[in-house]
Structures are given as C-alpha cells and as structure tokens.
Amino acid sequence: MIVGILGGGQLGRMLAMAGYPLGLRFRTLDPSAGAPAGHLTEQYVDDFTDTEALSRFAVGLDLVTYEFENVPVDSAKFLQRRVAVYPPPGALETSQDRLVEKSFFQRLGIPTPPFVRVDSWNDLENAIASIGLPALLKTRRFGYDGKGQYVLETEEDAVLAWQTLGGVPLIFENKIGFEREVSILAARSTTGETRCYPLIENHHEKGMLRLSLAPAPNLSEALQKPAEAYATRVLDELHYAGILAIEFFVLDGKLYANEMAPRVHNSGHWTIEGAQTSQFENHLRAISGMPLGTTDMKGCAAMVNIIGTLPDRRAVLSLPDAHLHLYGKAPRPNRKLGHITLSCASVEARHNQLGQLQKLIEFQLS
Ligand code: AMP
C-alpha cells in the first residue's frame, strides 16, 4: 500500500518511520526539495496548488493524508476525486478558519473562550464593549505558533493591533486567565473505532511549544472524561479518520477549547517511546482501516522541543531515559530542529532528568 503525504516536514518523516514496519510505502509532496521527509520517502517537489502536479502525485497511491493543516482545501478535494483522502477535507476546512472552528465547537456544546468576529474597526469597538479587555485579536486564517495575533490589554493596544492586522478577517477572543494548557490526541479509524491518549500538559515559549508532560500532572477523570467526550464528538461529527489534536485552556477545573489540528501533533511526539502505540502508527492504522493500537502509557513521559540550535548529542544521550529525534534540518533561529523524549518509570526520574536536560537546553520548568 502506498500512502501519499501532503507536506514533507518532520511530521511526514515520523509518519513514514512508523509506517515502514507496517508494510506501507510513502510518497511526499512538498514545495521544498530539502524537506525532512524527503530523505526517507519518494519525494515530489511541487506546489500544493498545481493541479497537474497533484494528478501526477496521485498516480498509484492507495491513500492520501496530510501533515500540514494549511494544505489548500481545494487541493485536498481535487485529490479526493482520484484517491481516498483522510482526515476528510471537511476537517481541514473547519480548522483553517478560527471563527469557523470556534463556532463548530460551540455548536457541538464544547466550551470555548467568548469570541466574536471582527471585520471592521467598528466591530472591534463593539467587541471591546461586549466581551471586554484583556483579549486577543487574531487573524482567522494562517496563524500558527502565536503568529498573527495580538494581546490587547488597553484600548491603545487595540489601535496598534488594528494598524497591523486590520484588513483581513479577524476574531476577537476573551483572554482566559488559564491555570494551564492541555491537549488531547484522539484516533478514529475508518471503521469508527476510537481511542484517546491521556491529556498532555503543554508549555509554550514565544508562542512555540517547548515542553509537554504526559500524562498532564494531577490528571483526574474529571478532566480526562470531558476531554474524551469532546474529542469523540468532533471525530464523529466530521466522520473523521486519523489522529486529531484539540488544545484546551484549563480554568477552575474546566476545559475551554482553543483550537484543533486535523493531523498528528507536536504535543504527541512522546508517544513514540512513551505509549504502547505511537500517534504516528495509530494515524496510519486509522486511515487504512486497520485495528487501532492501545493508547496506554508505558510510564510517564516528557518531550522537549529542540529549537534554533542543536544540543550536544553525547550529553543528551548520557541521560538514561532520553531519546533523541533530529529532523535533518539546518539550525536557524526559532526553527524546530528536533525533540527529546524522556520516557521514564516514575515522575521522580522524569523530574531529575528534566533538570539535567535544562543544563543542555534552555527551557522553563514552571
Ligand atoms: P493559538 O495560536 O490560538 O494557539 O495561541 C497561541 C497561544 O496564545 C496559546 O497557546 C495561548 O498561550 C495564548 N492564547 C491564545 N488564545 C488565548 C485566549 N483566548 N486566552 C488566553 N490565552 C490565549
């Protein structure tokens, strides 16, 4: 079976690495010749919007998936007329627009921060009056890793943000004074079988994911159960196949959905060593209709992203529970170059080794 992957980044690379033992083969499409998955897969270097290139790409494929959520929906639909595409393009459509996405959550009874659409300065003034400050003003489309958004504490901030962002469709959201940020990863197969991983606690620096702890510390059924119920609702509504990630804020023990990603997710990289079945393997099992693997943890895990500069490999590997994953990318500021997973038998061992890791990579342990 040959699986086509739209996007040739590290997520595509890790999908391929998980899929070879299952007897799958891979072809990736990415506009960049040096994309990380290209080293390991049959590589097509073309634009996502070039329909002739898409037709060439589709020849001989059994399935298409994507590892990049800004794949043009029209391209996914174009391919769908030739070969099965999972997750369904409708999931892409929903997640690419923050307003559509939050309205979708709302329709399914999944709590979100209060939000309102902003298309004009007048809308922004009304939003401040109705929802209040502090708030976030975000572009509806093409925002990632905290880009395309401003925190508004005062009305002056709103003027400055409007000068930069005004002119494109926006969303205004109440700023949630969250206690922590968590994510759930859930898999649904083409047969409807569904499994969820334990909630993960995520820490960001400069808008980028830096550290994930799995399971989220002090995780209770009171948090895990609603997260699973919300994820299942989204999966069923979208007739989904594959891995879906939903990010939440936690405030007063309640979950508020921020966004979802219809793909394997950075906060789930620890599953490669830390879970019985990795998110990458379960994504492939799900889209090809194979039974899903159990999502139980082997112990506890932490994942630290390597951003901008490479750490000393020997020093990282001297930590007994560390697993190093480098994506084959050249170092550049704010670029995700790899990650390190600590897969540990105990929370104490994880804490000790995270402390050691902090001497090698500068990250906050809050
Ligand atoms: P996003 O691009 O929506 O994932 O936002 C990036 C980060 O900004 C999130 O991980 C949060 O730390 C913060 N953030 C986004 N939206 C809100 C909100 N409504 N309230 C509080 N913090 C937020």
Image (cartoon, helix red, strand yellow):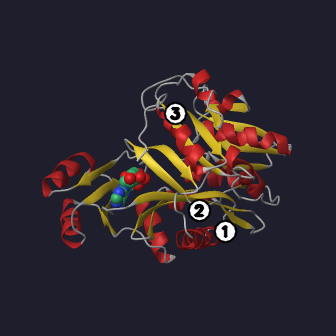
Rendering coords of residue 310 (x, y %)? 52, 24
Q: Report the residue marked by disc 2.
A: 90
Q: Is residue 98 left or right of residue 263?
A: left
In the image, what residue occupies the spot 47% across and 44% down? Answer: 209
Residue kind at label 1, given as amino acid type? His
Rendering coords of residue 67 (x, y %)? 61, 45
> Is 19 located above or below residue 262 in the figure?
above
Can residue 313 be spotted in the picture? yes
Residue kind at label 3, given as amino acid type? Gln
Rendering coords of residue 361 (x, y %)? 47, 30
Res. 239 mark: 1
Location of residue 128 by image quarter: bottom left
Rendering coords of residue 104 (x, y %)? 49, 70
Res. 36 mark: none
> Is 229 located above or below residue 121 in the figure?
below
CB within 8 Å, label 2 to label 3: no
**How many angstroms separate mark 2 from mark 1 (CA)?**
9 Å
> Is 100 located above or below residue 80 in the figure?
below
CB within 8 Å, label 2 to label 1: yes
Residue kind at label 2, given as amino acid type? Gly
Q: Circle 1: is it few (<14), some (14-19), or many (20+) Cα within 10 Å? A: some
Res. 356 mark: 3
Location of residue 289 by image quarter: bottom right
> Is 184 located above or below residue 324 in the figure?
below
Closer-to-camera residue (99/306): 306
Q: Is residue 204 left or right of residue 108?
A: left
Helix, strand or loop for disc 1: loop
**How many angstroms separate mark 3 from mark 1 (CA)?**
44 Å
Reading the chain from its start, which is encountered first: label 3 or label 1?
1
Reading the chain from its start, which is encountered first: label 2 or label 3?
2
